[in-house]
Image (cartoon, rainbow, N blue to C red):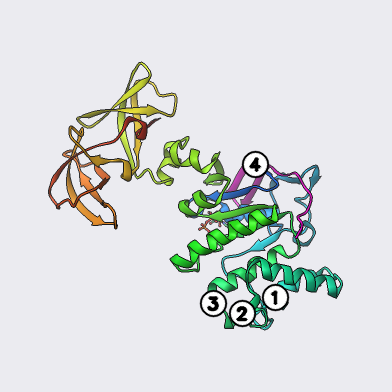
Amino acid sequence: MTHADFRALHLRGMSRDFGLLNALKGVDLTVERGEFIALLGPSGCGKSTALNCLAGLLPLTAGSIWLDDKRIDRLGPEDRGFGMVFQNYALFPHMNVRRNIGFGLRMQRRVKAEIDAKVEEAIRLVRLGAQAEKLPGQISGGQQQRVAIARAIVVEPPLVLMDEPLSNLDAKLRLEMRAEIRRIHNLLGCATIYVTHDQDEALSLADRIVVLRDGQVRQIGTPEVLYARPAHADVAEFMGYRNVLPARAMRDGGIVRVSVGQATFAGTLVDDVNDGPALAAIRPEDLTPRDGGPLAANVRTAEYRGRDFYGVAVTADGTELFFRAEHRVATGETLHLGADASRVLVYAA
Ligand code: ATP
């Protein structure tokens, strides 16, 4: 299967209002051919609006979309020719798998021999050979998802748009289909834009993650950067730094010391922070009981997660801390928690 020949998709100030609500505010992004981009953000941040604008289902209120040097934001969905995979699959219930997959090619009035060959190839690609003659109601959710993917890619689109495609599948199947989606993306060599609110999904699938909040891009980066060095405290919180603690920063040469309540410990500056109010962000897995741990806190709850225990402990001044322990801890027990300086990210307050 070949892919449409383009170099990059450009979003320039892409904006969409709903009445007085600015659902998307000037999104700038360049997606290279071959890239897998995850659009990540909390509910209501504008992910689906962005995808619908790209697909041509929603007009922009400002800005533009370009495929190389061709402006496409005033073209209808059919003329953009992007592949779309939705949460609810949107398969035709009365058509068998083969006919569902061939639908786009029939709409394009391709000749029968070409349609048959391309559908066969797509069926092989998503491994549905044994299901080709069945109706959607006769196959599993994961298989229906594969049909939706095959139908989207069979027309060889330059761009495949996916809106939370795995959210209706159980946990095990979700993991399998994740790997499957990435495998198919790699084979096709087109670009994929994948909307999700699930950080793990974004981290495991994407070449780059675009974090949206309130219709604005907060950060664009590789999974490694988003995981280890979120650029803002709110992005850190969204990426799993559940402890975002009001702190005071004191710069000391190359390092920074932070005080949280009575406790003082070393951290890593992310922002250009001055001495004074700051925020210290720490992942639960990095905040552990240790000798001389500066944060004394009483265990409120702890649960076993297979390898470690994760829990909540409360300091004397009432601050809740999310921690990890390698050994069982008891409710009411006092822990001395700490984290390595490289795992304490310090942001301007
Ligand atoms: P979710 O993860 O919950 O699907 P999202 O990030 O996809 O959320 P959008 O669906 O893009 O968010 O919505 C962004 C904002 O625009 C929200 O405040 C939403 O209420 C609003 N919105 C979306 N569609 C419409 C519409 N047709 N009319 C009015 N407001 C809308």
Q: Residues within 10 Å of mark 2 (few under 14, many from 20)?
A: many
Q: Which residue is mark 4?
A: 29
Residue at (78% x, 43% y) in the render: 68
Q: Which mark is residue 223?
A: none
Q: Which residue is mark 2?
A: 136
Q: Amino acid at mark 4?
A: Leu
Q: In the rendering, at what x and y percent does residue 28 appear?
A: 64, 40
Give the mark nearer the N terminus: 2 vs 4: 4
Q: Amino acid at mark 1?
A: Asn
- Residue 349 visible: no
In the image, residue 3 lies in the stretch drawn in magenta? yes
Could you tell me how far apart the alpha carbons at marks 1 and 2 are, in whole angstroms? 9 Å
Q: Secondary structure at mark 4?
A: strand
Q: Nearer the viewer, mark 1 or mark 4?
A: 1
Q: Report if the CB atoms under discs 1 and 4 are less than 8 Å apart.
A: no
Residue with the most extreme right position: 111
Circle 4 crowding by C-alpha within 10 Å: few under 14, some 14–19, many from 20: some
Disc on the earlier residue, 1 or 3: 1
| Span shown in magenta | 1-26
Residue hosting label 3: 140
Q: Which residue is mark 1?
A: 100
Residue 159: x, y in percent? 70, 54
CB contact under 8 Å: marks 1 and 2: yes
Give the CA separation, mark 2 to mark 3.
8 Å
- Residue shown at the point (71%, 57%) measured from the top left: 56
Closer to the N terminus: mark 1 or mark 2? Answer: 1
Q: Amino acid at mark 2?
A: Pro
